[in-house]
Amino acid sequence: MPETSTHYRSPVTIVPQSVSGAVESDAIDTAGWEEALLIVHAGAITATGTLDFKAQECDTSDGTYADVDGSDFDQLTHGTEETGFTGILHLGSLAGRKRYLKIVATQATEAAMGCAHLILQQPNFTPTEQAPGETAPAPEAGGGVTPPDPPFFIIHEGGVEP
């Protein structure tokens, strides 16, 4: 019987905090993953406060990042999200995307609580091709993609496992 579990990796991109100005995550290396899902959480947003979330991408971890089209959430405000909000946005296939992603949260006017997670889905760690009897070079020598740390959790038909 085939394996029924799907593996995910969810680095915490923006930890829960009172967002002041713009806060961005560290660069997230998407090499070896097929798809991405962005989950944002907003807590209390005070009277005239606003909170925006979006994804950005770049070819290098320390380069200049550009907005990912269609990755921004409608602006969250006190009037629409007084007691909390959780939003999920499927960023879709990572094929053709730049390798590194960042998540940006921007607050304006008054305090707003928020956090965000990027879930990388569908691992694809293809080994380097080699002739029979040869040993593939190590990833650090250009021999393929090194899988990241084990997934943080696994979702399968029976529920979630740590």
Image: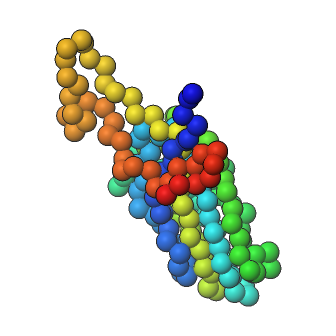
In the orientation shown, which residue stands out farthest toward the front? 1
Q: Quadrant of the N terminus?
A: top right
| Residue 151 in picture, x, y percent from top left | 44, 50
| Residue 143 in picture, x, y percent from top left | 26, 30
Q: Is residue 63 visible?
A: no
Residue at 80% in and 79% down:
79
Residue 48, quarter of the rendered image:
bottom right
| Residue 61 in picture, x, y percent from top left | 36, 52
Left or right: 15 as drawn, with respect to 93: left
Residue at 41% in and 56% down:
27
Q: Can residue 52 be seen in this view?
A: yes
Q: Which of 14 and 111 is in front in this view?
A: 14
Residue at 69% in and 86% down:
46
In the orientation shown, which residue stands out farthest toward the right? 79
Q: Nearer the viewer, residue 7 or 42?
A: 7
What coloring was used for the rendering? rainbow
Left or right: 106 as drawn, with respect to 15: right
